[in-house]
């Protein structure tokens, strides 16, 4: 049996842990409740830039030593930036927890931000930006959220703009750290062969600076503001990529589970309605799925596909037909049960990994200020009814309220509008 523990230190740092006695490894994450949503147009991309730069050296370690100190013990170090959070994390064998803790705490508290490294990393991130622009599957989701969240900082891309990336300097990075990386926004999360008292001891030992207090000021996204817009982007690509959808409940709303079940039924997995009707029965598209991408106060819900230009109209017609069915006819008890079991199964299977357990635990604390048990999540799934799904379908699957976006080659003439 695993055991959860939670402590809040006087300086504001939260420490949460899950002890799993039957493993010999750990996953350790240093989380900050800061992401691209905490930026504006003039500094968009700075959170992601800082994530990169923390690996480029501290006052006592250069980039190579940061990597060597972890990898020489068979460990692993990485990080990611999302629209709402940033996480720096490591994995390793139990005996090397302190070394990983030491390296991560050094990176966060004592970044060097050398101007020469900033200049080099700007080029790396611009290459990453170009990769996104060259990948229509990634680009289309960024553009979809840009339109869907227009007027809110959620519309800003995580990676930022080329203009901003080129112009970030040492002063900008230190200023943003001081303003946004307060200890009150920080969570230390660990799962695996870890002892909570050891984590408290290590925090006391290695966090010898004060990152201060950073108030969380975010403009909430107001649900009910459905933006209906169609747009076509022309690029030199072979396939046509299309996305359509709307906004709905975020993590803080209990009703989000309705959208999760509807997503399973509509387009999650090879037994879903869209996969069966578009790909299996008609052989139209290799990629076809629905999605639910969630934040604290809102989510995007919709359908994504890629196909050749000659099949797009037929694919869109089939999708419209499936959306209409879900709005008009209750799903069967059998289909509801299958969706529930699929949702529960994917969650429980993910818990085979200590990293996934650490991620789930930290995100639960960030979104709900507590660690939600799997039993509670399963109970919420089980309470969903066929009537809930029908009502949700009528709220979310109205195409007149969709944002619709198509990426196509300049040479392709489409009969249907985006």
Image: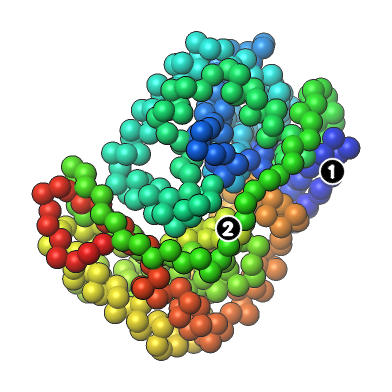
User: To which quarter of the image does residue 205 belong?
Assistant: top right
Split into 4 quadrants, where in the image is the N terminus? bottom right
Residue 29 percent location from the top left of the image? 66, 38
Question: In the displayed structure, would residue 19 be above or below residue 197?
Answer: below
Gap between marks 1 and 2, in whole Å?
29 Å
Label 2: state its secondary structure.
loop
Among the two numbered marks 1 and 2 on one chain, the one whose residue lies closer to the N terminus: 1
Closest to the observer, 90 or 151: 151
Q: Residue at x 56, y 66 (%)?
A: 223
- Residue 67 lies left or right of residue 364; in this view the side is left
Residue 231 percent location from the top left of the image? 29, 56
Q: Residue at x 76, y 28 (%)?
A: 211
Residue 165 percent location from the top left of the image? 45, 27
Mark 1: few/some/many CA within 10 Å (<14, 14-19, 20+) = few
Residue 386 percent location from the top left of the image? 52, 85
Identify the disc placed on residue 221.
2
**Foreground mark, 1 or 2?**
2
Split into 4 quadrants, where in the image is the C terminus? bottom left
User: To which quarter of the image does residue 169 belong?
Assistant: top right
Q: Residue at x 26, y 49 (%)?
A: 233
Q: Are marks 1 and 2 in contact (CB under 8 Å)?
A: no
Label 1: state its secondary structure.
strand
Identify the disc placed on residue 333.
none
State the colouring used for the structure image: rainbow
Question: In the displayed structure, would residue 166 be above or below residue 343?
Answer: above
Residue under numbered circle 1: 8
Residue 216 visible, this angle: yes
């Amino acid at each position: 049996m695993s055991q959860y523990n939670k402590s809040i230190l006087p300086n504001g740092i939260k420490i949460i842990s899950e002890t799993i006695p039957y493993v010999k490894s750990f996953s350790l994450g240093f989380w900050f409740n800061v992401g691209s949503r905490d930026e504006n147009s003039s500094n968009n991309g700075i959170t992601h830039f800082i994530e990169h730069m923390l690996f480029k050296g501290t006052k006592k370690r250069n980039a190579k030593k940061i990597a060597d100190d972890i990898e020489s013990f068979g460990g692993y170090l990485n990080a990611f930036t999302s629209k709402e959070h940033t996480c720096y994390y490591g994995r390793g064998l139990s005996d090397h927890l302190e070394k990983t803790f030491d390296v991560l705490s050094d990176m966060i508290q004592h970044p060097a931000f050398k101007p020469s490294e900033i200049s080099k990393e700007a080029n790396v991130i611009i290459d990453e930006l170009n990769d996104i622009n060259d990948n229509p599957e990634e680009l289309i989701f960024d553009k979809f959220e840009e339109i869907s969240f227009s007027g809110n900082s959620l519309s800003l891309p995580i990676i930022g703009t080329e203009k901003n990336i080129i112009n970030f300097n040492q002063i900008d990075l230190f200023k943003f750290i001081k303003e946004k990386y307060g200890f009150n926004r920080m969570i230390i999360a660990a799962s695996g062969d870890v002892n909570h008292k050891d984590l408290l001891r290590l925090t006391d030992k290695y966090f010898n600076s004060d990152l201060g207090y950073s108030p969380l000021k975010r403009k909430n996204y107001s649900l009910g503001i459905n933006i209906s817009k169609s747009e076509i982007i022309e690029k030199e690509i072979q396939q046509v990529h299309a996305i359509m959808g709307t906004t709905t409940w975020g993590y803080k709303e209990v009703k989000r589970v309705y959208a999760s079940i509807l997503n399973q039924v509509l387009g999650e997995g090879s037994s879903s309605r869209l996969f069966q009707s578009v790909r299996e029965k008609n052989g139209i598209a290799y990629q076809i799925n629905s999605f639910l991408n969630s934040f604290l106060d809102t989510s995007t819900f919709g359908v994504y596909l890629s196909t050749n230009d000659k099949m797009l109209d037929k694919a869109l017609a089939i999708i419209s037909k499936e959306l209409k069915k879900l709005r008009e006819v209750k799903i069967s008890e059998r289909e509801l049960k299958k969706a529930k079991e699929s949702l529960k199964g994917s969650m429980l299977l993910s818990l085979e990994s200590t990293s996934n357990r650490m991620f789930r635990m930290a995100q639960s604390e960030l979104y709900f200020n507590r660690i939600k048990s799997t039993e509670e999540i399963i109970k919420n799934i089980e309470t969903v009814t066929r009537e809930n799904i029908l009502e949700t379908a009528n709220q979310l699957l109205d195409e007149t309220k969709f944002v619709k976006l198509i990426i196509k080659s300049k040479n392709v003439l489409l009969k249907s509008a985006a």
